[in-house]
Image: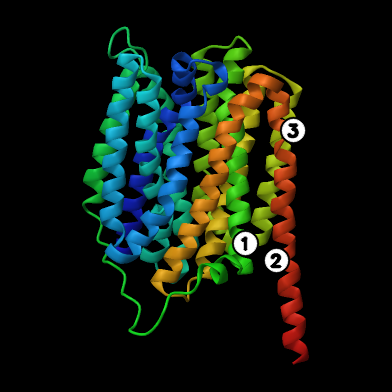
């Protein structure tokens, strides 16, 4: 195996460890929040704080990577994940909702750094391997579909009467193992801008059609996925199903999110980004049907599996489009584009996570699934707009 592919596979392993830790949070944070929060409407606040911290961290993390390289920031993020896991376990022992919320802020920093694994993979991969590298890194999370919720359930009573505290100690362990893997990464700091050359202004970066379409699809995909997924454990328990049923549904969801990564990059290369994005949007709309037709574990599982598959296609497609659109730019401009894209995406996710609990508590499960349809229309509109822009540019070039 050549060095560039080795770096990609190390990032795949890091992604697997991160998502395994994240899957524990996906499964339990809403439930722990429900146990510790002063009201049901605040049950998803800790989970929302993960995405708030992620959104607030993405820009400084990306700009710091452009200056000092990705490896130090990846290590810092993994260590923050370990701190967050330890604090969360202590918060459960103490019965402190405030301390649990603080722990989720550290988890957000871990998430902010880990989101750049896929961009690091495109930089490490050869030209003909870049789209597949993105898919492989995202696909690395498929291991978490089995291990994360299983580990959460297995460790839930490890600290005796303090249910789920042991699960968050497992997050601490996974983050530390991730740190050991990250030490092996060989990624030099990017070259500085040549003397006298300034970075491209932010407004010019975010106004590029490639940026607009890539981020519109990534932000909608992540926000819709998180909006539905955050409310799912509450809905499963609210229908009288067990915690084990909620964990199983999340497993189906995670498997559908990450397993397609092993072929979605190939689909982008073969079909083109636009078709993959539109297919993902259609699958998101289809995912609402089983959620609206029944409240059994099978209905929840089908809805969340389709939701996860749709997310994968739109997220891999959006990432590929952003990477392609800024491939010829300087490292600083790429870092700015990635930072702006991640900030917008996770700001949308933070709002979706925070709103999910309140909407479910006031309007119910059906309303959660119906509200995603207008957001999907925005993503479709952005994708079709880019096609019109490209067609117009082609006609102008032909007539020149």
Residue 360 lies in quadrant: top right
State which tag comes first along the sequence, 2 or 3.
Answer: 3
The residue lying at 29 percent from left, 27 percent from top is: 87
Residue 260: percent from left, percent from top: 54, 45
Secondary structure of the residue carrying numbered label 1? helix
Is the residue marked by circle 2 packed among few (<14), some (14-19), or many (20+) residues within 10 Å? some
Apparent side of residue 352 relative to residue 53 in the rendered image (left or right): right
Return the x and y of residue 364 as percentages of the image width and height.
69, 21
**SS assignment at label 2:** helix
Q: Is residue 42 above or below residue 143?
A: above
Residue 278 at x, y percent in the picture:
70, 53
Q: Which one is nearer the viewer's eye here, 39 or 400?
A: 39
The image's mark for residue 175 is none
For this rendering, which residue is in front, 57 or 260?
57
Q: Residue at x 31, y 58 (%)?
A: 70
Could you say whether the residue bearing mark 3 is in a helix, strand or loop? helix
The location of residue 348, given as percent across then percent down, is: 57, 44
Going from N to C along the chain, the mark reached first, 3 or 1, is 1
Per the image, the residue denoted by label 1 is 212
Query: Mark 1 packing: few (<14 Cα in 10 Å), some, or many (20+)?
Result: many
User: Which mark, residue 370?
Assistant: 3
The answer to which of 292 and 76 lies nearer the viewer is 76
Query: Which residue is disc 2 drawn over?
Result: 386
From this viewpoint, is residue 182 visible? Answer: yes
Mark 1 and mark 2 residues within 8 Å of each other at the beta carbon:
yes
Q: Nearer the viewer, mark 1 or mark 2?
A: 1
Q: Label 3, label 1: how many angstroms apart (C-alpha)?
A: 25 Å
Instruction: Give the residue drawn at x 45%, y 25%.
Output: 29
Q: Quadrant of the C terminus?
A: bottom right
């Amino acid at each position: 195996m050549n060095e560039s592919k080795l770096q990609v596979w190390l990032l795949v392993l890091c992604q697997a460890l991160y998502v395994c830790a994240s899957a524990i949070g996906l499964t339990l944070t809403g439930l722990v929040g429900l146990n510790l929060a002063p009201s049901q409407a605040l049950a998803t606040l800790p989970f929302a704080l993960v995405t708030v911290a992620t959104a607030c961290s993405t820009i400084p993390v990306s700009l710091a990577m452009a200056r000092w390289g990705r490896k130090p920031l990846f290590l810092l993020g993994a260590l923050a994940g370990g701190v967050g896991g330890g604090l969360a376990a202590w918060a459960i022992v103490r019965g402190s909702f405030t301390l649990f919320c603080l722990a989720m802020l550290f988890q957000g920093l871990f998430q902010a750094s880990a989101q750049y694994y896929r961009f690091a993979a495109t930089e490490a991969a050869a030209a003909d391997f870049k789209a597949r590298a993105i898919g492989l890194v995202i696909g690395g999370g498929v291991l978490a579909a089995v291990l994360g919720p299983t580990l959460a359930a297995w460790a839930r009573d490890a600290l005796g009467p303090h249910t789920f505290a042991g699960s968050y100690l497992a997050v601490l362990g996974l983050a530390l193992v991730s740190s050991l893997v990250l030490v092996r990464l060989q990624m030099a700091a990017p070259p500085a801008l040549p003397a006298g050359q300034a970075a491209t202004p932010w407004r010019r970066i975010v106004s590029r059609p490639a940026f607009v379409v890539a981020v519109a699809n990534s932000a909608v995909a992540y926000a819709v996925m998180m909006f539905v997924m955050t409310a799912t454990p509450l809905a499963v328990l609210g229908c009288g199903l067990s915690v084990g049923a909620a964990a199983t549904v999340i497993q189906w969801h995670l498997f559908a999110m990450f397993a397609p990564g092993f072929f979605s990059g190939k689909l982008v290369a073969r079909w083109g980004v636009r078709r993959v994005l539109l297919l993902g949007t259609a699958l998101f709309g289809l995912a609402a049907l089983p959620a609206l037709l029944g409240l059994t574990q099978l209905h929840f599982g089908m809805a969340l599996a389709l939701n996860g598959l749709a997310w994968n296609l739109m997220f891999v497609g959006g990432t590929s489009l952003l990477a392609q659109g800024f491939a010829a730019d300087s490292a600083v401009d790429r870092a700015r584009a990635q930072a702006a894209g991640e900030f917008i995406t996770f700001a949308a996710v933070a709002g979706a996570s925070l709103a999910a609990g309140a909407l479910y508590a006031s309007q119910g499960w059906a309303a959660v699934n119906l509200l995603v349809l207008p957001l999907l229309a925005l993503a479709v509109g952005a994708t079709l707009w880019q096609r019109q822009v490209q067609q117009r540019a082609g006609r102008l070039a032909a007539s020149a």
